[in-house]
């Protein structure tokens, strides 16, 4: 807690000094002529004033030293690495975490070059990074691969953020060890790629035998239909139907596995136009379903045209497929929120209970039988994956019997 500041104004000091002099026993004062007496009095007052000032100086010096010690302790024991570096990358100051990050626990690295800990391939980038901070006088950050002396095969990674110091001679840098984060990230990417490849190969390899099953069943139907009895006819047509369904599921898995691996590069996509093109091509189906699809202004965003068209198409298709007793009505709208667009697809269909809102975005999760509403259960999983690939989110507002509104976001960025 802060102590109450003492009043050290000249008037107050004078008053305090006079007071202290009054309190001194008269024995300390020699009898003097009137002028000399006043002079001596003044001198004594000044002396006391000086003593008071000195006392104050000592106090503030002690406070500064205590604050410095506190700061040094915090600096030294902070869990993040701190460095002060000069233009050449020499270490002028560092804390324990700094030494730890460079694999030199409890070692004084002052005077050593930071560059000797930077992996060869990142050295010139790091020199450029320092030069930029000094040249611009502004904060900058970079990612570096570090090499521990004596352990060249064990790379670690650091995220460095540095600001120029007021002297203009050094920079203060904070370095975070991101080795683990990078490792997990790379592992995730690798296992994700493996999974996609696995799904792709599995689905692809399943297609050949499935085609044969479907083909032979159709041959049976054509050549032996009405000759094996009604029960056999019904079994054969079931084989044909299931083979077709299996083919649809495999196609869906292939489509899902291709989203990341075979997505196109991003470009400016006019969602209004994409929507109109789809409605034009689907006009006959919409008329047959007595469906009305309308839209407000939709933005131009940056993304993969085909994939974004697929998201809109899947959501519109679902809005029509999961219809109630009324003719289906679907409306698309968009609004800007912070740095992103929120696109919403409203329908007047059967709606979905809140407890299923998360589940339906999972692959193969369906709420209805094939008989009631046909489908593969992958459409929304595809939508979610595409939206995530674009840096957005997808969710819905819905209640049974009240229709559904599916929303997804897309960052508002320039191409
Ligand atoms: P599919 O339509 O092929 O089953 P989706 O992944 O598109 O697969 O949808 C998953 C499930 O979510 C559907 O089976 C359905 O139960 C529910 N659903 C999706 N969209 C709607 C909607 N607009 N209205 C009501 N239910 C829906």
Image (cartoon, rainbow, N blue to C red):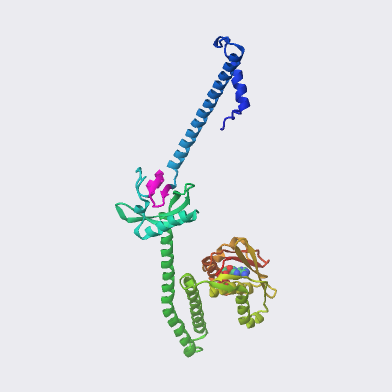
Range of magenta residues: 82-101
Asked whether residue 183 is in view, the answer is: no
Q: Position of residue 286 (x, y in %)?
A: 65, 79
How many numbered tags mark residues here? 0
Does the stretch in magenta take in 285? no
15 left or right of 134 in image: right
Q: Quadrant of the C terminus?
A: bottom right
Residue at 54% over, 28% down: 56
Across and down, in percent, residue 31 comes to 58, 9
Seen from this angle, which residue lies furthest left? 150
- Asked if one can make out residue 166 in the rendered structure from this viewpoint, the answer is yes
**93 part of magenta stretch:** yes
Q: Is residue 211 left or right of residue 317?
A: left
In the rendered image, the vertical position of residue 61 relative to residue 404, given as above or below:
above
Please state which of residues 338 and 38 is positioned toward the viewer in this rendering: 38
In the rendered image, the vertical position of residue 48 relative to residue 334, given as above or below: above
Q: Residue at x 58, y 17 (%)?
A: 39
Residue 127 in percent (x, y) is at: 40, 57
Q: Quadrant of the N terminus?
A: top right
Q: At which x and y percent is residue 49?
A: 56, 23
The structure residue drawn at horizontal position 49% and vertical position 47%, both measured from the top left corner, is 166
Q: Quadrant of ligand 1?
A: bottom right
Instruction: Specify the farthest residue to the right.
Output: 326
**In this rendering, would 167 be left or right of 414?**
left
Comparing 290 with 9, the one in front is 9
């Amino acid at each position: 807690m802060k102590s109450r500041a003492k009043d050290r104004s000249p008037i107050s000091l004078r008053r305090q000094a006079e007071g202290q002099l009054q309190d001194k026993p008269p024995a300390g004062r020699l009898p003097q002529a009137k002028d000399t007496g006043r002079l001596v009095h003044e001198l004594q007052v000044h002396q006391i004033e000086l003593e008071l000032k000195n006392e104050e100086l000592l106090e503030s010096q002690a406070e500064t030293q205590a604050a410095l010690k506190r700061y040094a302790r915090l600096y030294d024991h902070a869990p993040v690495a701190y460095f002060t570096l000069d233009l050449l990358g020499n270490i002028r100051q560092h804390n324990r975490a700094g030494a730890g990050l460079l694999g030199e626990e409890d070692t004084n690295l002052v005077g050593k070059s930071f560059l000797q800990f930077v992996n060869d391939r990142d050295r010139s980038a790091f020199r450029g990074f320092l030069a930029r901070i000094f040249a611009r006088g502004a904060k900058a950050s970079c990612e570096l691969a570090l090499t521990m002396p004596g352990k060249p095969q064990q790379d670690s990674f650091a995220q460095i953020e540095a600001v120029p110091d007021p002297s203009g001679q050094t920079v203060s840098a904070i370095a975070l060890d991101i080795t683990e984060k990078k490792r997990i990230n790379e592992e995730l990417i690798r296992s994700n790629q493996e999974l996609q490849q696995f799904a792709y190969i599995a689905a692809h390899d399943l297609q050949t035998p499935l085609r044969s099953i479907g083909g032979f069943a159709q041959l049976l139907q054509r050549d032996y239909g009405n000759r094996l009895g009604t029960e056999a006819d019904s079994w054969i047509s079931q084989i044909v139907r299931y083979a077709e369904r299996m083919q649809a599921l495999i196609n869906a898995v292939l489509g899902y596995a291709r989203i990341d691996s075979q997505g196109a590069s991003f470009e400016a996509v006019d969602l209004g136009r994409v929507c109109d093109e789809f409605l034009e091509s689907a006009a006959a189906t919409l008329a047959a379903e007595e469906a009305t699809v309308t839209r407000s202004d939709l933005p131009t965003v940056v993304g993969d045209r085909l994939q974004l068209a697929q998201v809109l198409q899947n959501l519109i298709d679902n809005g029509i497929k999961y219809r109630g007793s009324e003719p289906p009505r679907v409306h698309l709208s968009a609004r800007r929120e912070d740095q992103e667009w929120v696109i919403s697809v409203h329908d007047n269909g059967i709606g979905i209970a809140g407890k299923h809102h998360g589940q339906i975005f999972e692959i193969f999760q369906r709420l209805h039988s094939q008989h009631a509403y046909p489908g593969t259960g992958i459409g929304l999983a595809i939508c979610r994956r595409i939206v995530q690939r674009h840096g957005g989110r997808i969710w819905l507002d819905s209640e049974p019997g009240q229709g559904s509104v599916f929303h997804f976001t897309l960052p508002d960025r320039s191409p």
